Image (cartoon, helix red, strand yellow):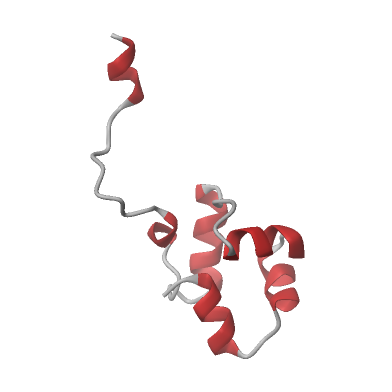
Amino acid sequence: MDLRQHIDQSGERQAVWADRIGISRAYLSDLLARKKLPSLRLAARIERLTGNAVGASSWVPDDGAPVTDETESAV
């Protein structure tokens, strides 16, 4: 489940969730539109506040690309 689905199912307004999470309404809107990604700390806070319904890993795109260590390319 993503955050938008969770908020919709909660029946509460986005403004309530923005306040609960501790972010601006504009930033929440950007997160919901996937224009921005949360920091790991914020993703973990969202996970806790949603009772684990929206996992921190839900923000990681699953594009099938291999994960690489950026330092490898510097060698």
Between 57 and 30, which is closer to the camera in this rendering?
30
Residue 17, position as x, y percentages in the image:
67, 74
Q: Residue furthest top?
A: 75
Residue 72, position as x, y percentages in the image:
28, 18
Q: Is residue 61 left or right of residue 4?
A: left
Q: Residue at 56% across / 52% down in the picture?
A: 38
Q: Is residue 25 left or right of residue 53?
A: right
Q: Is residue 24 visible?
A: no
Q: Is residue 60 left or right of residue 41?
A: left
Q: Looking at the rendering, which quadrant does residue 4 occupy?
A: bottom right
| Quadrant position of the C terminus in the picture | top left
Between 70 and 65, which is closer to the camera in this rendering?
65
Q: Residue at 75% across / 65% down in the picture?
A: 25
From the viewer's perspective, is residue 9 above or below residue 53? below
Residue 43, position as x, y percentages in the image:
51, 57
Residue 11, position as x, y percentages in the image:
62, 91
| Quadrant position of the N terminus in the picture | bottom left
From the viewer's perspective, is residue 67 above or below residue 28? above
From the viewer's perspective, is residue 32 above or below residue 64? below
From the viewer's perspective, is residue 32 above or below residue 13? above
